[in-house]
Amino acid sequence: MNCFYHPESSAVGICKYCGRGVCANCLSVTDDVLACKNRHEDEVHELEQLTARNLFQAKRVGSNYMRNAIFYGLVSVAFIGFGWWTLQWLGLQAVLFIALGVFLLYAAGANYFEGRKYK
Ligand SMILES: [Zn+2]
Ligand SMILES: [Zn+2]
């Protein structure tokens, strides 16, 4: 690939904003990313600011917590249900299942409340 602005020189990088190849003379490094010199430096800078915004990060983390909460919740219900159902046959072993289920329920709750913080 050659430079978009100088077809005679070969490109050394790609502008993050416009996606065009740029040669060493047209290349500018803004916030550790490449941009067309004197053309898209500001745009790339804004783009980086946008993706670096904490809100974005927090939202992703929050949804991870929610997914964990649902997963733990489902597994805990399965454990408690299984323990409850087999209590009359398994005795103490079933109690262990229920205890594990309660622990997972606690983990689900903790994840749920942690996730709500990011809303
Ligand atoms: Zn550009
Ligand atoms: Zn060039």
Image (cartoon, rainbow, N blue to C red):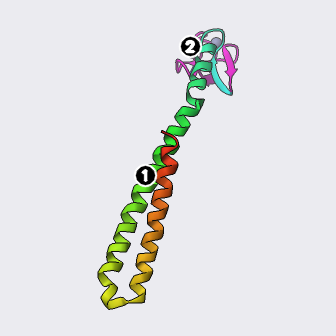
Q: Nearer the viewer, residue 10 or 56?
A: 56
Residue 37 visible in image: yes
Q: Quick check: is the Cβ at mark 2 less than 8 Å away from ligand 2?
A: yes
Label of residue 4 in the image: 2
Asked if 119 appears above or below 73 in the picture, the reply is: above
Name the quadrant where ligand 2 sits: top right
Quarter-of-image position of residue 95? bottom left
Q: Classify residue 33 by image quadrant.
A: top right
Secondary structure, mark 2, is loop
Percent across and percent down for residue 34 are 64, 23
Measuring from the top left, give residue 46's x and y in whole percent: 59, 19
- Which amino acid is tagged 2? Phe
Q: Which residues are magenta?
A: 3-31
Amino acid type of the residue tagged 1 in the rendering: Arg
**Is residue 29 part of the magenta span, yes or no?**
yes
Say which residue appears at 60% left-offset and 13% top-offset. Answer: 40
**Residue drawn at point x = 40 percent, y = 67 percent:** 76
Residue 10 visible in this rendered orientation of the protein: no
For the residues bearing labels 1 and 2, Cβ distance under 8 angstroms: no
Which label is found at residue 95? none
* Label 1 to label 2: alpha-carbon separation: 45 Å
Instruction: Look at discs 1 and 2 and give the one toward the viewer.
Output: 1
* Residue beneath disc 1: 67
Please tell me which residue is depicted at 60% across the width and 24% down the height of the picture: 49
